[in-house]
Image (cartoon, rainbow, N blue to C red):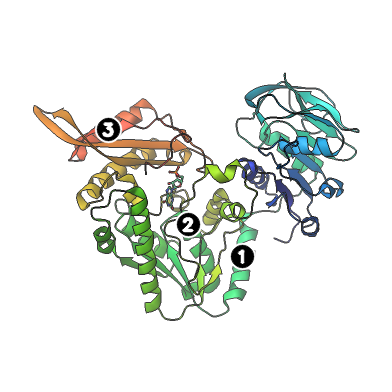
Amino acid sequence: MNQSPIVVLDFGSQYTQLIARRIREMHVYSVIVPCTIKFEDLAEMNPQAVILSGGPASVYDPASPVADERVLKMNVPVLGICYGLQWMSYKLGGRVEPAERREYGFARLEFEEPTELLAGLESPLRVWNSHGDHVAAAPEGFRVTARTENAISVIENFAAKMYAVEFHPEVRHTVEGARILRNFVEKICGAKPNWYPRSFIEETVERIRTQVAGERALCALSGGVDSSVAATLVSRAVSDRLICVFVNNGLLRKGEFEKVTAALREQARLNVRAVDHSARFLKRLAGVADPERKRKIIGEEFIRVFEEEAKALGEIPFLVQGTLYPDVIESVSVKGPAATIKSHHNVGGLPKDLKFKLIEPLRELFKDEVREVGRELGLSEEMVSRQPFPGPGLAVRILGEVTEERLRLLREADAIVVGEVRAAGLYRELWQSFAVLLPVSSVGVMGDARTYASTIAVRAVTSEDGMTADWAKLPPAVLERIATRIVNEVNGVNRVVFDITSKPPGTIEWE
Ligand code: XMP
């Protein structure tokens, strides 16, 4: 993007990505770089403002992440958040006191005029805190404009355009957090909105057209949003010279292979080679109950199938992948807790030594931006708002062995869960909603007969990025319809339970 970004310097907070997302929601371009970036490289990006993220460390910890102090003297507005506030205060001569214990959770923010950062808001505000150290005295030139019961919470230096907050305005728990960031981005920085899907599409299509220049490109479709949008973008540039391979691994949901193939051909006008290799996958999974073994087998088999398909198509120099910005950041960022919370399983990924030149048109985008781009490209709402579905598919939602019969049970039950969630208008609010088949049989009674049959667990979660998640409080009437329909309609299931575990400590998937 040839506009100056608002650069977020990452000190390792699990919330860093949210900062950039909130700014982009204002249609202003924002990028994340590790705090250890060379100053010259940062300066070359010509940032219109710098935001210092939170982080897990204390400024007194010798191993704490450090940035080049010259970032505080670039003559652009600066906003420090949490550790960013402490680091900035410490470097500018304020006093930071080590914490006896971390302050975590809600706090009441009381503030007073004049304030630029909190302008237009009313004191007190409910804010979300997660910090260890706190600032005991602001650096020279700064005013304290807000406090919580325990600590100095907001400091501002209007003349130097430097601001910092102890709490996290980027998380939804902070009431008015978005307004606070908006004050910084729009009023203080004067940033102009110019980050829109349409301009992104135009630039990307142009770039890919030049890059591919008359050659052919290959794309492995999964049916998910990312690969569908990536392929559609590339096909806008190279038309039928993009060949999309969609493999049925036998672990897709009810009707998914047919429906997705049709949608991608008709709506997205993609050149799709849909190949059914279910039998191969199921044969290799026979007798396997261990989740990691399942994942490994599916991953390996996928690579084999894809290599065979690619070979049959002759020499193709380019490969399209739906890599998103979070994956790109994760591979370069400082190792904060964010790095360890997420166990990133990328089954279905291709080996690095395949001799393709990569096209990754979504490398700069967050998931919600991918959806917006998809809409702008004319993909249907059903396509772009699909919930994530894991690469190993239903195999990791069948606890124990994967068999045709167990796949049938799960497919039927899952279609009911998703159907009822959609009918209740809840599908888009949920990060994921699905059924899990448990390796548990229990006794029931149907009509006058005793039954002894399988159990389905219903899983529904809300989340912003899949790294943490809350169990969704589905209305009892919806749960009741789901349970009644599954037991009545899915022959072989006589009990339905609802999973009320959040992540952490649970994971979203059961395997
Ligand atoms: P967990 O279960 O770890 O899942 O809380 C977090 C997110 O990742 C998805 N997931 C997977 N995606 N291959 C994938 O491509 C996998 O093996 C896999 N396991 C989990 C999960 O659906 C959720 O969105």
Q: Position of residue 202 (x, y in %)?
A: 62, 64
Q: Amino acid at mark 2?
A: Leu
Q: Position of residue 165 (x, y in %)?
A: 75, 33
Q: Nearer the viewer, residue 19 or 270?
A: 19
- The residue under label 1 is 204
The disc at residue 496 is: 3
Q: Amino acid at mark 1?
A: Thr
Q: Is residue 165 above or below residue 8?
A: above
Residue at the spot 31% in from the left edge and 43% down from the top edge:
414
Q: Earlier in the sequence, mark 1 or mark 2?
A: 1
The quadrant in which the C terminus is found is top left
Alpha carbon separation for disc pair 3 and 2: 35 Å
Left or right, residue 78 beside residue 320: right
Residue at the spot 55% in from the left edge and 80% down from the top edge:
214
Residue at the spot 79% in from the left edge and 51% down from the top edge:
48
The disc at residue 379 is: 2
Q: Is residue 491 above or below residue 36?
A: above
Q: Nearer the viewer, residue 139 or 264?
A: 139
Q: Position of residue 191 (x, y in %)?
A: 77, 48
